[in-house]
Image (cartoon, rainbow, N blue to C red):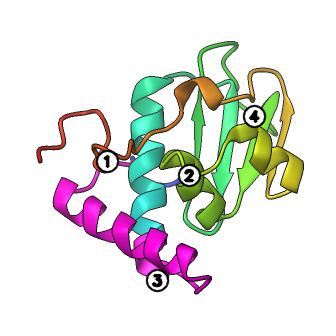
Amino acid sequence: MPARLRPADPTDVAAALARVLQAHDAEERPPAEDLRLLVRHSLALLLARAPGRSVEVRVPPYAAIQCVPGPRHTRGTPPGVVETDPLTWVLLAAGRTTWATARESGTLAASGERTDLSAYLPLLPAGDPAGSDGGAS
């Protein structure tokens, strides 16, 4: 488990999100440093929205967290695991794709209890790219 994640500066998040979405729309590879910032930022927001340890969310190579209320998990693989690539996670967090679409396309794998995180998404609403935790515009 990585060091504690913290939300990033809202200005940095907005700029990184704009670059990633622009690259995605142009069918280009988004900058890795922007993906890293957005993955870590949005996972920090997810931790705040869904505290707990019953689901492990893995977005390699940038971060993995345990979240969602439920039975506490302490060893081995948790009862619920979600794994996806950084771009898919950012698109989910930004509301540019849905949970169902990502699962159906195979870019997101979710197994076990409590792994449908759609109730917690988006984390980066279009009107507030820094998240709903106080990003100023």
Residue designated by label 4 = 75
**Residue 135 horizontal side relative to residue 80, left or right:** left
The answer to whether 121 is drawn above or below residue 90 in the figure is above
**Residue 80 horizontal side relative to residue 122, left or right:** right
Identify the residue at horizontal 55%, vertical 22% (top origin): 52
**The furthest residue to the top:** 70
- Amino acid, disc 4: Arg
Per the image, is 116 magenta? no
Of circles 4 and 2, which is in front? 2
Per the image, is 18 magenta? yes
| Dominant secondary-structure state across the stretch colored magenta | helix
Give the percent coordinates (x, y) of residue 92. 59, 48
**The furthest residue to the front:** 26
Identify the residue at horizontal 59%, vertical 23% (top origin): 119
Measure how far apart labels 1 and 4 are at the Cα level: 24 Å
**Residue 72 horizontal side relative to residue 124, left or right:** right
Measure how far apart labels 2 and 3 are at the Cα level: 18 Å
Q: Is label 1 in a helix, a strand or a loop?
A: loop
Residue designated by label 1 = 6
- Amino acid, disc 1: Arg
Span colored in magenta: 5-34
